[in-house]
Image (cartoon, helix red, strand yellow):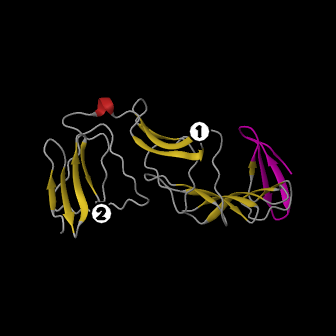
Amino acid sequence: NENCAKFIPDGAVELYHNNSKKFETSSTGASVTGNLTISGDLTVNGTNTVLNTTTLDVEDKNITLNKGSGDTSGTADGAGITIQDAVDASTDATILWDASTDSFNTSHKLNVTGAITSTGDASFGNQLTISGTGPTLYFTDTNHNPDYYIQNSNGTLHIRDVTNSSNRITIGTTGNVGIGVSSPNEKLHVNGNLRLGVNPTLNWSSNHLTLQAAADSIG
């Protein structure tokens, strides 16, 4: 004899396949043994939904949290993702929404491979670290030129005018500072004239240094 179904009075309903129980009702709900395929929508009404699985694959490209009818902004604070025991048995890792600042708070640092683009203000706490070969920080003004970047190139720091392809300030590996010079040879190496105060100007031309004031010139 082979069981196909059992209907127990005031009790469970059991469904079988090849004499193996696959579906069973109980006083608290129902249970399925094996895979379950649903061709339509699945609506779960409850406080907690527990998925005991090693890998969760979601074909939908968008996941909505704090979804509800009408304006749900009043319950959005703290919405996000929590990884239990990410660090140790008492320390989780979280990415949570802070409604008071309209921003996400992360409990731990982020390691990013690739570019980060911000269209608004960005603020950092203790430090910002950019690592790699020739790490570069760009400053691009969408309304005006020139644009600049700061780059550490083999231990030499450049502040470069990207628009005009020129290094404006360079700090060499020995600490020498160059203005308009890519390889400074002295503590301060300037390519061009210097202005001291309001009027006096130091001019270098044809191996001759001239200090020129408003009306007088001292050679």
Is disc 1 placed on a helix, strand or loop? loop
Indicate the position of residue 28 as horizontal and vertical percent values: 25, 40
Indicate the position of residue 137 as horizontal and vertical percent values: 59, 56
Picture layout, residue 174 above or below residue 50: below
Mark 1 or 2 closer to N-term?
2
Give the number of the mark in front: 1 or 2: 2
Q: CA distance from mark 1 to mark 2?
A: 34 Å
Please name the residue shown 59% across and 39% down the image. Answer: 90
Please name the residue shown 44% across and 59% down the image. Answer: 54
Is residue 166 shown left or right of residue 59?
A: right
Picture layout, residue 2 above or below residue 125: below
Picture layout, residue 3 above or below residue 198: below
Q: Nearer the viewer, residue 89 or 86?
A: 89
Q: Which residues are magenta?
A: 195-219
Residue 90, which numbered label?
Answer: 1
For residue 179, what is the image quadrant?
bottom right
Residue 34, which numbered label?
Answer: 2
Please name the residue shown 30% across and 39% down the image. Answer: 66
Is residue 116 shown left or right of residue 136?
A: left
Where the N terminus falls, by quadrant?
Answer: bottom left
Amino acid type, label 2: Gly
Indicate the position of residue 188 as horizontal and vertical percent values: 82, 53
Magenta-span inclusion, residue 91 = no
Is residue 131 shown left or right of residue 185?
A: left
Picture layout, residue 140 above or below residue 95: below
Q: Nearer the viewer, residue 174 or 28?
A: 28
Badge 2 local density, few (<14 within 10 Å), some, or many (20+)? few
Is disc 2 placed on a helix, strand or loop? loop
For residue 150, what is the image quadrant?
bottom right
Amino acid type, label 1: Ser
